[in-house]
Image (cartoon, grey):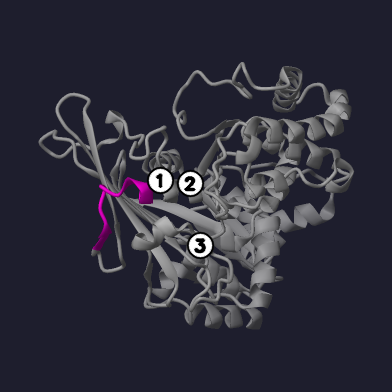
């Protein structure tokens, strides 16, 4: 069982968000889409305190109505089995959660936690919670504290933000430093050395010191077992099971492992008897302070973690490492945040392979664009940004990304753009191949006006079009090699 859906209403600048997530989910979007607020809302509803019924909402989290009164915050967390009809062999949830469980339409076991927070006079915040079924009927009210406690222990939330790992009680405290330990914890020397190495990683200094990483890796593992004692869950210790020599031979990968392992060791680990734990690991902006060459290593480590992963990023280099199926693109429409992703069976396996190489690996920035200008070849890819500059527009600043589609095919790109909510426009040559591309694109307009999405050149290719449009002398001059061509 895992977290499958997060519904937010009236949290900060987010009027509403309905986010569907999987085992690994990466959120991308412009600054106005509120990615940090999404992280904070999940953390607040998941509880960051010692008390079983405590929540971490703050007065600044509340939106105001037109008359200035604070509006109630509503958060729903849906948990479901991944496979239908009891096909999930090992669920092993603690028996105390039984009253909160129900079967969805696919016969999967599910839980739905609803949290409502209301700010009263002054800074007082009242929070109520209950477990519901799919039809909104109450299964468990907030008098049964043990059920909520069991949910939190079975699905602990760990937030890694800016290199800091936060457990249950201190997500938003500003006075944290990396690797701050209790004074009574064992092995102070190891902790200090890890902190020093961590800071060197962030500052991209002291590469020669990475030779001490193997020893520190072993000592981190020992420290985790000592500091957590019998409460250390299996998922946590599995991250350190393999000897350093078997983990990787790449220096950058070793750095990534130490970086993430060092952050995780600060997280509070919980266990609930013999029940398996399914932690929810939230990593905000993993690219912070890291050289781009380290991002692939960090992603590789994240993939190996035995936890559900939710990440936010603004890095084109990091997104290039992420499978397209894990990407959730956020867009703001008024006060509502819309989450879009590649739909199941939208692309065939072959189309997904081609698009993943073409868009994700070659042009990670395309996933952040507002509009794709689909062009046939290299000439148009160089030409269109230059023409934009002549007209007073920097296409990249306007969110327009030129993507050549000849090797990938135009249809897979149109499907992906549609699923992710990215506008697209096809610039096609006037030859037979161009007409085929236009015919394919017309089938995917879904009622849109063709002129809004398709432009066909009156000539067989863009070079001939420019020649006929009065630029013949430019081509002659370029071909002669006698005079340089002005940038203008």
Q: Nearer the viewer, residue 294 or 487?
A: 294
Q: Are marks 1 and 3 in contact (CB under 8 Å)?
A: no
Query: Which one is earlier in the sequence, the residue at label 2 or at label 3?
Result: 3
The image position of residue 290, as x and y in percent, is 69, 33
Q: In the displayed structure, does residue 93 sit left or right of residue 305?
A: left
> Which quadrant is the C terminus positioned in?
top right
| Magenta segment boundaries in residue numbering | 138-148
In terms of sequence position, does the residue under pointer 1 or pointer 3 come before the other? Answer: 3
Query: Which residue corresponds to mark 2?
Result: 153
Provide residue 447's location: percent of width, then percent of height. 37, 78
For disc 3, the neighbor class at 10 Å (few under 14, some 14 to 19, many from 20) is many
Residue 436's quadrant in the figure?
bottom right
Residue 83 visible in the snapshot: yes
* Circle 1: element type: helix
- Percent from the top left, x then y, of residue 246? 87, 48
Residue for point 65% across, 74% down: 351
Q: Residue at x 71, y 39 (%)?
A: 292
Task: Identify residue for label 3.
Answer: 1
Q: Are marks 2 and 1 in contact (CB under 8 Å)?
A: yes
Residue 149, disc: 1
């Amino acid at each position: 069982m895992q977290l499958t859906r997060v519904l937010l209403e009236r949290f900060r600048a987010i009027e509403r968000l309905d986010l569907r997530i999987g085992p690994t989910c990466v959120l991308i979007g412009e600054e106005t889409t509120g990615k940090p607020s999404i992280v904070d809302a999940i953390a607040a509803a998941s509880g960051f305190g010692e008390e079983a019924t405590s929540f971490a909402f703050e007065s600044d989290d509340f939106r105001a109505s037109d008359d200035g009164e604070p509006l109630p915050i509503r958060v729903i967390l849906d948990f479901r089995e991944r496979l239908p009809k009891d096909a999930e062999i090992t669920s092993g949830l603690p028996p105390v959660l039984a009253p909160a469980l129900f079967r969805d339409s696919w016969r999967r076991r599910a839980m739905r936690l609803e949290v409502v927070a209301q700010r009263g006079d002054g800074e007082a915040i009242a929070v109520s919670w209950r477990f519901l079924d799919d039809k909104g009927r109450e299964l468990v009210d907030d008098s049964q504290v043990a059920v909520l406690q069991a949910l939190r222990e079975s699905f602990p939330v760990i937030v890694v933000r800016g290199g800091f790992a936060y457990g249950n009680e201190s997500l938003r405290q500003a006075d944290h430093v990396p690797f701050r330990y209790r004074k009574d914890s064992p092995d102070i020397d190891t902790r200090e050395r890890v902190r020093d190495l961590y800071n060197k990683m962030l500052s991209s200094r002291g590469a020669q010191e990475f030779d001490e990483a193997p020893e520190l890796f072993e000592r981190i593992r020992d420290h985790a077992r000592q500091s957590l004692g019998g409460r250390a869950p299996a998922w946590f210790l599995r991250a350190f099971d393999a000897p350093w020599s078997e983990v990787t031979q790449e220096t950058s990968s070793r750095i990534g492992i130490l970086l993430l392992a060092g952050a995780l060791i600060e997280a509070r680990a919980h266990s609930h008897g013999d029940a398996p734990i399914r932690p929810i690991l939230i990593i905000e902006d993993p690219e912070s302070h890291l050289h781009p060459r380290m991002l692939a290593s960090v992603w590789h480590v994240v993939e190996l973690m035995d936890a559900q992963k939710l990440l936010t990023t603004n890095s084109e280099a990091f997104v290039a490492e992420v499978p397209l199926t894990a990407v959730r693109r956020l867009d703001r429409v008024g006060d509502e945040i819309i989450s879009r992703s590649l739909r199941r069976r939208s692309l065939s396996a072959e189309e997904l392979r081609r698009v993943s190489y073409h868009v994700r690996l070659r042009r990670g920035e395309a996933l952040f664009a507002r509009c794709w200008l689909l062009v046939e070849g290299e000439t148009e890819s160089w030409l269109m940004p230059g023409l934009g500059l002549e007209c007073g527009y920097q296409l990249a600043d306007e969110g327009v990304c030129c993507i050549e589609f000849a090797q990938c095919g135009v249809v897979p790109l149109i499907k992906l753009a549609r699923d992710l909510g990215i506008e697209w426009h096809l610039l096609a040559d006037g030859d037979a191949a161009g007409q085929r591309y236009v015919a394919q694109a017309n089938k995917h307009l879904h009622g849109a006006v063709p002129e809004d999405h398709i432009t066909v050149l009156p000539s067989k290719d863009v070079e001939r079009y420019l020649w006929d449009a009065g630029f013949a002398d430019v081509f002659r001059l370029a071909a002669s090699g006698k005079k340089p061509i002005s940038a203008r």
